[in-house]
Image (cartoon, grey):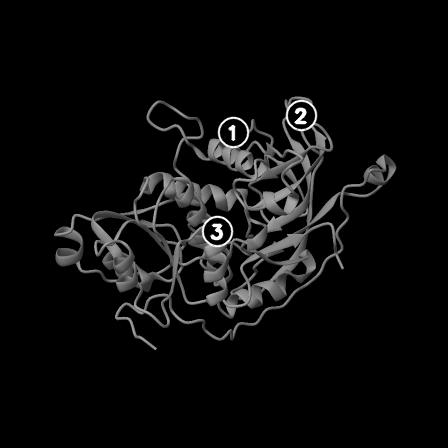
């Protein structure tokens, strides 16, 4: 097995963490108005009270105000990179300056409107929506009585987009933003290091942009097989072959014009730099904690490379003349692509389980990347 100086795509570690689950009785919104009035509305929510501990807690949901929607989940998608950071106790991964009593993961939520406040336009009870909510069965949008910003407004789903597919909208937005920033063009060589869910979606968007070749790099053969189905022209198992040499070979010896680091393993970055063409770009898209050393003079300065992170939290919510693709507009476009059948995600789903099985799924994620890819939680099934 070929060794890499960078230790690229580090091997899966054995899980030693303790995961426990505490189930609480969840009373979901009822179609019976007498039951709704008689009982307080409660919801189930996934929490991480301590590192490597998972529980399903009970929370109370207030009556919706005039400016709010009451919504009920059908599916959520685990965002493995970010949520594994949270599971390990990294509150900064949630954008928090201090650690709370429990971290609440999730942002890929699909469900339906139960009730719309009088001041909310464009939504009615029964509408299917996608929203940036945590792994929670019932919630208010927005969470406090304030006008919704464009980012907080849920987006309606057409019949052509299933609930399962819609759970990918948030991560597809992440991948699309990365590809927009890297700007691969027709005939540009692209390399994607790490083909988890975001990496698979980057492959698809790079293909739409006209990039060729598109080289997917990973340690897991199954994920590489799926990358070919997503549109990769070449795949490299970095545990067996020299990924940098393979990328250079298929790009006429020059390297990739755009390299995407879509893994949470920081030691991959030096390989990403070496795989880039002179004047190329490296987009750090995976939620990689920690630090890594790089060669500043030889690799970065002399080759005039550009390294940047892709993160949308500080972007405006409305388009303007120099920036036409904020997050809400990206997500609208992703939904359109799914409805037209041009963005495919069904082949990426490895597990679809009741939300009560969340602890087992997080334990699987902690064991390493083999044996799973996209994990969808079903909130209509509490078995």
N-terminal-most mark, 2 or 1? 2
Q: Residues within 10 Å of mark 1 (few under 14, many from 20)?
A: few
Q: Is residue 133 left or right of residue 269?
A: right
Q: Nearer the viewer, mark 2 or mark 1?
A: 1
Question: Viewer-proximal residue, 163 or 100?
Answer: 163
Q: Give the crowd class for mark 2: few <14, some 14-19, many >=20 residues within 10 Å.
A: some
Instruction: Identify the disc placed on residue 66.
Output: 2
Q: Which residue is mark 3?
A: 230
Numbered disc 2: secondary structure: loop
Q: Nearer the viewer, residue 43 or 304?
A: 304
| Among the two numbered marks 2 and 3 on one chain, the one whose residue lies closer to the N terminus | 2
Whole-Å distance between the Cαs marked 2 and 1? 15 Å
Which image quarter is the N terminus in?
bottom left
Of 118 and 228, nearer the camera is 228
Total residue callouts? 3
For the question of whether residue 312 can be seen, the reply is: no
> Is residue 250 in sight in this rendering?
yes
| Residue most extreme to the right | 34
Q: Is residue 31 above or below residue 322?
A: below
How packed mark 3 is, by other alpha carbons closer than 10 Å (few <14, some 14-19, many 20 or more), is many
Q: Nearer the viewer, mark 2 or mark 3?
A: 3
Q: Is residue 122 left or right of residue 247?
A: right
Which residue is pictured at 59% across the width and 50% down the height? 346
The residue at the point 48 percent across, 51 percent down is 230
Q: Earlier in the sequence, mark 1 or mark 3?
A: 1
Q: CA distance from mark 2 to mark 3?
A: 43 Å
How far apart marks 1 and 3 lie (CA) works out to 34 Å
Per the image, the residue denoted by label 1 is 149
Q: Position of residue 128 (x, y in %)?
A: 67, 36
At x 54%, y 33%, the residue is 336
Is residue 162 depicted above or below 19 in this figure? above
Q: Position of residue 71 (x, y in %)?
A: 68, 38
């Amino acid at each position: 097995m070929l060794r890499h100086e960078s230790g690229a795509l580090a091997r899966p570690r054995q899980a030693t963490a303790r995961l426990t689950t505490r189930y609480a009785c969840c009373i979901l919104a009822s179609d019976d108005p007498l039951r709704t009035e008689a009982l307080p509305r409660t919801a189930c929510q996934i929490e991480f009270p301590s590192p490597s501990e998972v529980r399903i807690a009970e929370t109370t949901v207030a009556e919706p105000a005039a400016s709010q929607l009451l919504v009920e989940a059908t599916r959520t998608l685990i965002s493995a990179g970010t949520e594994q950071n949270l599971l390990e106790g990294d509150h900064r991964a949630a954008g928090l300056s201090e650690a709370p009593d429990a971290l609440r993961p999730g942002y890929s939520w699909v469900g339906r409107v139960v009730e719309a406040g009088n001041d909310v336009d464009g939504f009615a009870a029964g509408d299917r929506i996608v929203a940036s909510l945590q792994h929670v069965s019932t919630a208010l949008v927005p969470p406090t009585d304030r006008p919704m910003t464009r980012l907080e407004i849920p987006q309606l789903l057409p019949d052509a987009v299933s609930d399962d597919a819609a759970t990918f909208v948030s991560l597809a937005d992440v991948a699309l933003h990365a590809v927009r920033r890297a700007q691969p063009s027709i005939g540009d060589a692209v390399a994607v290091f790490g083909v988890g869910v975001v990496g698979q979606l980057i492959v698809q968007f790079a293909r739409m942009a006209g990039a060729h070749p598109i080289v997917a790099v990973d340690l897991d053969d199954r994920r590489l097989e799926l990358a070919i189905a997503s549109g990769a022209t070449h795949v490299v198992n970095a545990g067996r072959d020299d990924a940098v040499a393979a990328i250079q070979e298929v790009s006429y010896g020059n390297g990739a014009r755009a390299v995407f680091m879509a893994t949470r393993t920081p030691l991959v970055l030096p390989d990403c730099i070496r795989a880039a063409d002179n004047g190329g770009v490296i987009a750090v898209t995976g939620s990689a904690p920690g630090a890594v050393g790089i060669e500043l003079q030889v690799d970065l300065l002399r080759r005039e490379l550009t390294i940047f992170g892709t993160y949308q939290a500080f972007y405006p919510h409305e388009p303007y003349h120099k920036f036409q693709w904020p997050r809400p507009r990206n997500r609208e476009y992703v939904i359109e692509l799914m409805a037209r059948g041009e963005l495919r995600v069904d082949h990426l789903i490895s597990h679809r389980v009741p939300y009560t099985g969340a602890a087992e799924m997080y334990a699987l994620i902690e064991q390493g990347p083999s044996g799973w890819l996209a994990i969808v939680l079903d909130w209509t099934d509490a078995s």
